[in-house]
Every structure is written in C-alpha cells, then in structure tokens.
Image (cartoon, helix red, strand yellow):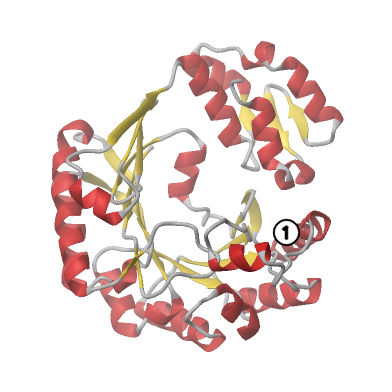
C-alpha cells in the first residue's frame, strides 16, 4: 500500500504542549507555502508514477486554515500527478474552531472523506491548560458541521495524563466523546516536551503531571471504556469501530511506502528514507528533501517488527522473514523469551502479539526488538 502525507504546519497559536514546528498563519504565507508544495508534488511524480495511492493525509498544523482555493489547488495537484485509488482514504486534520459548515462542505467537495478533529478534552480547565483555542461547545459544533456536510468517517483526538487529571475527569472526557458517536477515537498520553509552555511550567514546579502508575491506570481505563462502547483498540493509542481503522497510519505500521511533502515531512520507498527540513523557512528554501538512510534487509526486518508490535495484530515473523530474508526468530530468541516472561507479549505460531500490558509499554517492547 502507498500513501501521501502533506504537512500544512500553520496554526493560529501554539498549544502549550506542542513541540512540533508550527508557523503563525497568514494568508500570504499559506499561499507561498501551497505553491511550493504543489511544485514539490510535481517533482515527485517521476519517482512515484504508476503506483496507486491508497491514502492521502493532510496533517497539521491546521490544514483547515488554508483558504478553499489553496486546498483545491493542492488537491488538484495530487490528482494531476498521482493515481488516487477509487477507494482512497483521504483525511484532513482540523481544530474544532475551524470546522464551520462552509469548511466542512469544502473539504467533502474536494474529496476528503475522513476528518480528524483535535478535541483533546471536554473540560474547559484542561483546554485552557493545554493552550487550546476552542471550548467544549466548539467540539460539538464541529462534529455537527462535519455530519451535516456528509462526513461518515470522523475521528476525535483526546489527550490524557494532564496535570491534575483524575480518573473521573478522564472518564467524563471519554463518555462525552463517545456520545458524539465518532467512528474513531485516538487517545494519546500527554508528552511533556522541553521548550514548550507546559514543559517550562513542569520544570519550574508549577505543574505536575500524573505519575507513571497513574497514567497506566488512565490508559487501561480508557481502553476498557472505549472497547465496551464498540471501539476496538487496533494500535497503542487508536480505537475504531469495525471497518474504520485509519488506513493511512496502518500503512506506516505495516512498513508500506509513503511520500511526504512539506515542512518536516518524511518519505519511505523500499527502505530508502528522506525528509524535508522541519522549519517552514528551511522547507521553502530547500530544493529537495534530505536523504536520511537506506535500510539494509536486516534493518528493515527489525523495523517491521518494531512498528508491527504497536498494533493489536502484532508481528508475523514468518512473513517478515519471507519479505526480508532475515530470521528474527533466531536473532531475537532471548528478547522474545524475556518479553514473554515479563507478560508483554504472547505467541500465536510465528506471530508475536502484544498483551494489554505490552501495549502500555510499547516503547520498551520496540527497543527490545530493535536492531541493536
């Protein structure tokens, strides 16, 4: 499977927890950026020609800040230079305050068939602490606008592990999200990053996030509530109703190929990886992405295992052996035994599957299976 990721890293303000590069939005800046994006899509055509594109993802920043003519030009360039599959999943991220009825109708009219709304929380206090611009009412309005426009595939993002957050508060967020009947819910643990407003508050002792044990309890609570509501956990942080798992992200976890265009966007083609500079100014000045590495078959085998172990299906070692010629069963025997003893994975034939505890400690499982 092949996907395209387009980075549109413009925001009205920088959230207190966000360590990603984001540029204050201006109409002139967005227009210049879109023209560069369109030129780079054209330049990528020879390398990616002839491949059906199964997923397209407009990531932020806030793609829905871009004016309708710019979004139309970007989507037109994708269709002009690439072969979008008839059933392609086309996603746009959106902040709630930007999803008005005209915006939702524009997105759907351009072929976007999946919208991912960054709700994060339904608590006014938590939203202020995160530096979000919207209030709970804006989440409801955004979902209503998307549904009225005709979106039948809608995802909500939530964050847990906030300073002062309780189990009851997290449960309330989940229940309010479920009440809106999205097809997909992502539940991410808050990461405290240096250089962010929240990171500085924590460093100064002005905020204290829940400890590891409390976050583990919140994670388990979230998974239980979502699964009881019909949202199966198919990846560490992602839950979906049947048939609504995010295909774009699944392509990453399954080792597929993808083209990334825009500031900080990475590409992977047959194990060869490249990335554009992350700052917008650096991207605008770059003639081409920087080559990062080309994975050896052994490295690719380990990479496939690490990413697959983030998913409920786990890693099929026999399939990885067939694809790369690398026998991870032999190479990783001690690590596999140790992880199984620790209750982090279980075996089903040649397949390694993370346990619920293994999902919680996915980074540790991945580190144990990485090519060392």
Residue 68 at least partly seen:
yes
149 with respect to 187 (left or right):
left
When the figure is inspected, residue 230 is found, relative to residue 284, above or below; the finding is below
Which residue, as the protein is rendered here, is positioned at the far right?
341
Tell me where residue 334 sits by quadrant. Answer: top right
Image quadrant in which the C terminus is located: top right
Which residue, as the protein is rendered here, is positioned at the far bottom?
137
| Residue 273 image position (x, y, % from top left) | 36, 31
**Foreground of the two, 58 or 346:** 58
Tell me where residue 98 sits by quadrant. Answer: bottom left
Looking at the image, which residue is at 79% across and 54% down? 212
When the figure is inspected, residue 13 is found, relative to residue 225, above or below; the finding is below
Looking at the image, which residue is at 23% across and 35% down? 48
77 with respect to 243 (left or right):
left
When the figure is inspected, residue 18 is found, relative to residue 317, above or below; the finding is below
Secondary-structure class at tag 1: helix
Residue 230 at least partly seen:
no
* Number of marks present in the image shown: 1
Image quadrant in which the N terminus is located: top left
| Residue 185 image position (x, y, % from top left) | 58, 63
Looking at the image, which residue is at 83% across and 55% down? 213
Looking at the image, which residue is at 27% across and 63% down? 111
| Residue 192 image position (x, y, % from top left) | 62, 58
134 with respect to 329 (left or right):
left
When the figure is inspected, residue 265 is found, relative to residue 372, above or below; the finding is below
Q: Which residue is mark 1?
A: 223
Which residue, as the protein is rendered here, is positioned at the far front?
204
Mark 1 Cα-neighbour bin, 10 Å: few <14, some 14–19, many ≥20: many
| Residue 188 image position (x, y, % from top left) | 61, 59
């Amino acid at each position: 499977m092949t996907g395209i990721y387009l980075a549109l890293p413009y925001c009205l303000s920088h959230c207190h927890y966000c360590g990603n590069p984001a540029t204050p939005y201006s109409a002139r800046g967005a227009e210049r950026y879109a023209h560069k994006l369109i030129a780079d899509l054209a330049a990528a055509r020879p390398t990616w020609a002839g491949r059906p594109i199964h997923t397209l993802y407009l990531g932020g920043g806030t793609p829905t800040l871009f004016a309708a003519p710019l979004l139309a030009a970007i989507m037109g360039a994708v269709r002009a230079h690439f072969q979008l599959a008839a059933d392609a999943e086309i996603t746009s991220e959106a902040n709630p305050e930007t999803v008005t009825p005209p915006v939702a109708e524009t997105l759907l009219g351009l072929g976007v068939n999946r919208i991912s709304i960054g709700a994060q929380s339904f608590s006014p206090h938590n939203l202020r602490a995160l530096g979000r611009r919207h209030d709970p009412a804006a989440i409801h309005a955004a979902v209503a606008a998307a549904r009225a426009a005709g979106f039948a595939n809608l995802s909500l993002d939530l964050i847990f592990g906030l300073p002062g957050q309780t189990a009851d508060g997290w449960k309330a967020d989940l229940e309010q999200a479920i009440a809106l009947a999205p097809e997909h819910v992502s539940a991410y643990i808050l990461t405290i990053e240096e250089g962010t407003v929240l990171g500085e508050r924590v460093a100064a002792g002005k905020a204290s996030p829940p400890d590891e044990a409390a976050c583990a309890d919140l994670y388990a609570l979230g998974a239980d509530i979502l699964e009881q509501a019909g949202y199966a956990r198919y990846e560490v942080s992602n839950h979906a109703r049947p048939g609504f798992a995010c295909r774009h992200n699944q392509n990453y976890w399954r080792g597929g190929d993808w083209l990334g265009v825009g500031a900080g966007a990475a590409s992977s083609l047959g194990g060869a990886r490249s990335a554009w500079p992350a700052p917008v100014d650096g991207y605008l000045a770059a003639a081409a992405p920087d080559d990062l590495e080309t994975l050896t078959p052994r490295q690719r085998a380990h990479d496939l295992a690490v990413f697959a172990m983030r998913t409920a299906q786990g890693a099929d070692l026999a399939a990885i052996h067939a694809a790369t010629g690398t026998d991870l069963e032999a190479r990783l025997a001690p690590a596999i035994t140790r992880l199984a003893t620790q209750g982090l994975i279980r075996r089903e034939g040649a397949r390694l599957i993370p346990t619920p505890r293994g999902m919680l400690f996915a980074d540790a499982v991945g580190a144990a299976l990485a090519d060392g």
